[in-house]
Amino acid sequence: MTGIQRAFASTDTPNDDFQSLFATHPSPMWVYDPDTLCFLIVNNAAVDLYGYSREDYAGMTVLDIRPAHERQRMIAAVHARSDMERAERWTHLKADGTMLEVLTYGRGVRFNGRDAILAIVQDRTEVNAAHREISDTRSLLDSIVDNLPVGVFVKDMEADGLYILFNEACGDIVGRQSLDVVGHSDRIFFDKEQTAAFREQDARAFAAPAAISFEETMQRTDGQQRILRTVKRALPSPDGSAPRYLLGISQDVTEERSVEARLAYMAMHDVLTGLPNRAAFAEHIKRASACATADKPVALLYLDVDHFKHINDSKGHAAGDALLCQVAGRLTDLADEGDLVARLGGDEFALVVGFREPGCIERFAERLLASLSSPFDLDGVNEHVTCSIGIALAPDHAEDDDVLMRHADLALYAAKESGRSTYRFYEPSMRLEAERRHMLTAELREALQKNQFELYYQPIVQLENDRLGGFEALIRWNHPERGLIPPMEFIPVAEETGLIVAIGEWVLREACRTAADWPLNLKIAVNLSVSQFRHNGLLASVVSALDESGLRPERLEIEITESVFLADVGQSLPLLKSLKELGIRIAIDDFGTGYSSFSYLRAFAFDKIKLDRSFIAGIDTDPGNLAIVRAVVGIGSGFNATTLAEGIETETQLLRLRQEGFHEVQGYLLGKPMPLAEAERLIARGGVVASTAA
């Protein structure tokens, strides 16, 4: 018995000393009646812990400090005196409703002449909370390790490398249940070679001052190859002794490496054809040109499919893609092992070919041309295409890869300029021509800014009365150093660079402004290029030029070539119809020299058909040319269009055209392109053009 128990048991009423000991004891205590369960006395610690006042306790039973679910258990314990033999765990209620986790010790005592029970309480709330926190932390750590997306394992290196920790991710990596691995070593699950590799890694980890990391290819127990990224390190011992345990962290990066390999492949290969792309080509040509010698030269071939855009426009992009894939296949079939075939983009391909024998590159280029000349099967339809090839040799033409590529590009440009469907080797004159075009481009920009352009006007004569019907506006360039430059020398460059759009807009505005002051019966004809028709602002530019000048729309004739219909019929046709709805007259220029089909004549009602000068030159000697002249007259009559023949240089030609029924003519016989002042003098004379042809 404790001293307090003995004090209660020795007398019916405890003496003062023990009464004081009871009241001041740090453990909460009380005495209660086992029959009524009422509190008989409560010490200070119980009052402080539970928060009830002594007056509260006087009206309470021991059931009142227990939650409802434990009251029946309390009654049973009192009746059975089960809490008299050992400490019991209980949940008690404080005055504010807070739950307490306690241990209680019960002892029988005599109090005021009757049997009573002394209860001694130990508050275990904080202790239990600490234990739960430790347990929860351990459970959390176990759960974290088990559920980590990377493999975590620990080996006991003093016990032959037995696994003492092997989480589920590790099991997934090696193809085993983690519980089957713990307590076993590597040799149970892996072959000798793999086990030896693991042991060598472990030894390096124990010898290294810090963690080691590496990637390895591991064969799972089911035979699959997996790529692992692993970190291993020896765990320091708490007492500073030699390490015993090895910690390892492994991540399966097989899919990641597969994706990286796929991305790397895609970064260096063309998606459509599967050929190496421009990036791969740049790396290859850099190496190849650096290694090229006189004994082992290298040829770079740039290849373009001629008029590829026509395939896309007429048959659709799917057919264009199919054509590119077939071209890629034929080029690959012709290339030897070690050669490179790459697609640089669009319809442009590159080949890097090694050679030794003189003339073999010429033969190879001819084989390329011959191979691509065979028809391609595009959705069951045979399609014929040609290609242009530019060739530069290393080290003959250049030793630097950048220069070599520029030279091959210049040779390709020359092949296109030569009529396409051919190949050209680089020549120094090509570089000079490229420099000339570059300088000319800069000068053209300056000419546009400094207003160096001038319009000349060529008379258009009406054969019914030999009078002036109007003029065709033709641009000239007054170069400050080279004088008057004809359009054939700078218009092609303007077309290539896109400057033709700005230059053409200037021509349109200037021609409309000038013609607005002429007699109302005179028209002005202005040529528009394919590039202008591709520009979205053309219609707005024409409307603006008419509004600013005040020229009536029916006095403006816009001349286009048949190539406009090859560029983009879907865009050109609506634009032509919009122009005609304004009242503008539309003429087809250079008729008979371009488009192989006259179907566009049915699609759009032209106001004028201009027969190209090439059919006029031999009209008096060539029956074929005469037949074409008569055919054009018939076409014009059938479509209710004015017919105009250009390039008239002789009286015989003029007479024959008059006899065949042409409406209008142009040519040096009737008037060369002239400055504005001379054109205005012609207008002032009444527009009468002298002619001896009757």
Image (cartoon, helix red, strand yellow):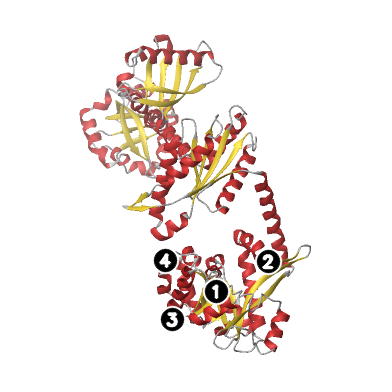
Tag 1 near tag 2, CB within 8 Å: no
Task: Quarter of the image for the C terminus: give it.
Answer: bottom right
**Hey, which quadrant is residue 144 in on the image?**
top left
Tag 1 near tag 4, CB within 8 Å: no
Where 410 falls versus 260 (above or below)? below
Tell me if mark 1 has few (under 14), some (14-19) or many (20+) residues whose alpha carbon lies within 10 angstroms of its own: many
Could you give the CA–CA distance between mark 1 and mark 2, rounded to whole angstroms? Answer: 19 Å
Tell me if mark 3 has few (under 14), some (14-19) or many (20+) residues whose alpha carbon lies within 10 angstroms of its own: some
- To which residue does mark 4 refer? 597
Lower position in the chain sequence, tag 2 or tag 3: 2
- To which residue does mark 2 refer? 486
Q: Label for residue 637? A: 3
Q: Position of residue 512 (x, y in %)?
A: 63, 80
- To which residue does mark 1 refer? 559
Could you give the CA–CA distance between mark 1 and mark 4, rounded to whole angstroms? Answer: 19 Å
Where 380 falls versus 686 (above or below)? above
Where 479 falls versus 99 (above or below)? below
Q: Nearer the viewer, residue 337 or 673?
A: 673
Residue at the limit of the structure toward the front, as seen here: 621
Could you give the CA–CA distance between mark 4 and mark 2, rounded to whole angstroms? Answer: 31 Å
Q: Residue at x 48, y 55 (%)?
A: 307
Could you give the CA–CA distance between mark 3 and mark 4, rounded to whole angstroms? Answer: 19 Å
Lower position in the chain sequence, tag 3 or tag 1: 1
- Which kind of residue does numbered mark 1 sit on? Glu
Task: Quarter of the image for the N terminus: give it.
Answer: top left
